[in-house]
Amino acid sequence: QVQLVESGGGLVQPGGSLRLSCVASRSIFSFSTMAWYRQAPGSQRELVASLTSGDSTNYADSVKGRFTISRDNAKNTVYLRMSSLKPEDTGVYYCNALGKTGSLYWGQGTQVTVSS
């Protein structure tokens, strides 16, 4: 069973930055896509950013130019660098991995709160 462990969330003021990390229990080469989702209170979970094994990236329109997804293969880790944070970025951020056979894995989530 694959485990994804997120960290790096917290309370930050508007305009601030955070870097989220997602450590996988096996090589991230085994996944076709890794992604970050978020869920705000009372809202559905939404895709924030994704990164394919071929290094293609995709971002939600609301975070383009402010968030960057990247990975460190040696550390089996995917990152989400978030800058110019806004109150509407508040939510629980989840790491997601899609296996090459179609299996889908989720982390437990990390809370991000943007507030003054």
Image (cartoon, rainbow, N blue to C red):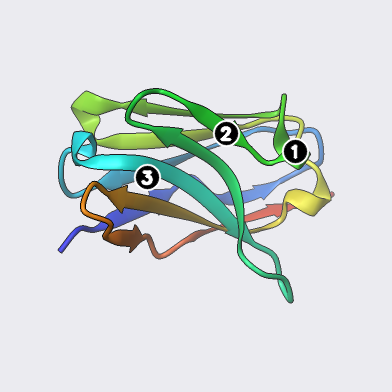
Marks 2 and 1 sit apart, C-alpha to C-alpha, by 9 Å
- Where does residue 103 sit, x and y in percent of width and height? 26, 60
Kind of residue at badge 3: Cys
Residue found at x 38% / y 36%: 78
**Which callout, 3 or 2, points at the residue further toward the start of the chain?**
3
Q: Which residue is mark 2?
A: 58
Relative to 87, 49 lies left or right? left
User: Disc 3 and disc 2: Cα gap in Å?
Assistant: 17 Å
Type of the residue with mark 2: Asn
Q: Secondary structure at mark 1?
A: helix
Between 103 and 15, the one nearer to me in the picture: 103
- Residue 39: x and y, percent? 63, 64
Q: Which residue is mark 1?
A: 61
Q: Quarter of the image for the N terminus: give it.
A: bottom left
**Where is 113 relative to 79, above or below?**
below
Give whichever of discs 3 and 1 has the lower sequence position: 3
Extreme bottom residue here? Answer: 42
- Labels 3, 1: front one: 1
Determine contact: label 3, label 2, CB under 8 Å: no
Q: Which mark is residue 99?
A: none
* Label 2 residue SS: strand
Residue 114 locus on image (x, y percent)? 75, 50
Around disc 2, counting alpha carbons within 10 Å, would you say few (fewer than 14), some (14 to 19), or many (20 or more)? some
- 91 relative to 61, above or below: below
Say what amino acid the circle numbered 1 marks.
Asp
For the point 44% across and 33% down, the residue is 51
Which residue corresponds to mark 3?
22
| Residue 73: image location, x then y, percent | 24, 26
Local SS, label 3: strand
